């Protein structure tokens, strides 16, 4: 009863009107990719391509030119690998390798001036299907699975100035295929699943690096894993996801200040394993899988609040 009541209340609130429009498609269909914004441009890297194989391809979208360009490939193919930007640097964090979904501990940064990827200090332990946020110039990695396909409770923080990792408070609910976004110096870990797409979570847990503590927040109106999230205008837009036999078009918006969820216009193309990034006051939803499991699209949908 409590769960149902929360669902109704969450959906009774509307996150404004807003509308979706079609963006310039990706140069190729890709799922299980991530996105980040550097200098007003959106970067995506890795994923699973239209042949069902892990890819090393990386692309950059320039909103001013309304164009995708290919940049230097990753050193080796990766998928389920989060991207994040700290200051003037793009990072690619861990991920899964090969068709057997092997977690890895690599950390690469992208050198925009040289159009190349360079290694940095490896993660404390291999992990993929995790999520990353940035607070106070540091990367915070949460969730995912590690060796033996075991869920990771440990959280890790990377200091680029020292090229060094340190431990952080473990996430209260270990999960993979979750999303994360940061607002006001706090990281919000959203949704995900315990390895099983039939057991998705609606959980939201907030990590404050200033206190090294996690606190529960209001759950999502829906239970979703394989979703994506991006911070836009002080709120967090959460889109897409996957259940065992279906994919989600859900678009729900979380207001951290009010600890409240609201419904928003659904995705034009339901999918999972998608990427999301906000730039220029718009939300860009990129690629993903329009069917459960292995499926790829080149669709880019743009939401204007």
Image: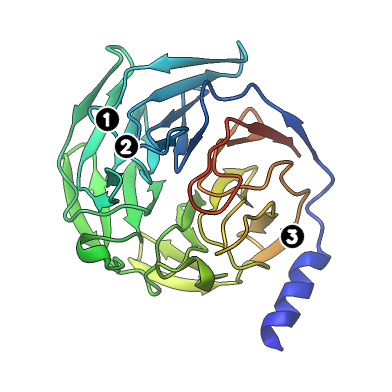
Q: Quadrant of the C terminus?
A: top right
Which residue is most to the front?
51
Residue ID at (38%, 43%): 82
Residue ID at (32%, 46%): 139
Question: Reading the chain from its start, which is encountered first: label 2 or label 3?
Answer: 2
Q: Which residue is mark 1?
A: 109
Marks 1/2 in contact by CB < 8 Å: the verdict is yes
Marks 1/3: CA–CA distance: 35 Å
Residue 267 at x, y = what percent? 71, 45
Q: Quadrant of the N terminus?
A: bottom right
Residue ID at (72%, 28%): 22
Tell whether 295 sits left or right of 235.
left
SS under mark 2: strand
Question: Reading the chain from its start, which is encountered first: label 1 or label 3?
Answer: 1
Marks 1/3 in contact by CB < 8 Å: the verdict is no
SS under mark 1: strand
Tell whether 7 sits left or right of 257.
right
Marks 1/2: CA–CA distance: 6 Å
* 2 or 3: mark nearer the eye: 2
């Amino acid at each position: 009863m409590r769960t149902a009541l929360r669902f109704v209340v969450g959906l009774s609130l509307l996150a404004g009107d807003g509308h979706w429009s079609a963006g310039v498609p990706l140069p190729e269909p890709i799922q299980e990719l991530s996105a980040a914004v550097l200098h007003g441009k959106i970067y995506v890297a890795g994923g699973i391509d239209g042949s069902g194989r892990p890819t090393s391809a990386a692309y950059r979208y320039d909103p001013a030119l309304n164009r995708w360009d290919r940049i230097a490939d990753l050193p080796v193919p990766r998928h389920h690998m989060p991207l994040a930007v700290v200051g003037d640097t793009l990072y690619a964090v861990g991920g899964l390798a090969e068709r057997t979904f092997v977690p890895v501990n690599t950390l690469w940064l992208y050198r925009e001036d040289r159009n190349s990827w360079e290694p940095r200090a490896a993660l404390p332990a291999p992990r993929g299907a995790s999520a990353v946020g940035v607070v106070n110039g540091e990367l915070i990695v949460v969730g995912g699975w590690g060796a033996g396909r075991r869920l990771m409770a440990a959280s890790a923080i990377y200091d680029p100035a020292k090229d060094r990792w340190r431990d952080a408070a473990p996430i209260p609910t270990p999960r993979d295929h979750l999303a994360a976004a940061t607002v006001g110096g706090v990281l919000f870990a959203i949704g995900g699943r315990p390895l099983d797409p039939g057991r998705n979570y609606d959980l939201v847990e907030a990590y404050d690096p200033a206190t090294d503590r996690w606190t529960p927040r209001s759950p999502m109106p829906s239970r979703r894993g394989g979703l994506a999230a991006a911070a836009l205008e002080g709120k967090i837009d959460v889109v897409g996801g996957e259940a065992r036999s279906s994919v989600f078009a859900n678009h729900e918006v979380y207001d951290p200040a009010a600890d409240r969820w609201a419904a928003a216009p659904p995705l034009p193309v339901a999918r999972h394993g998608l990427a999301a990034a906000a730039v220029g006051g718009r939300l860009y939803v990129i690629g993903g899988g329009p069917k459960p499991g292995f499926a790829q699209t080149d669709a880019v949908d743009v939401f204007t609040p």
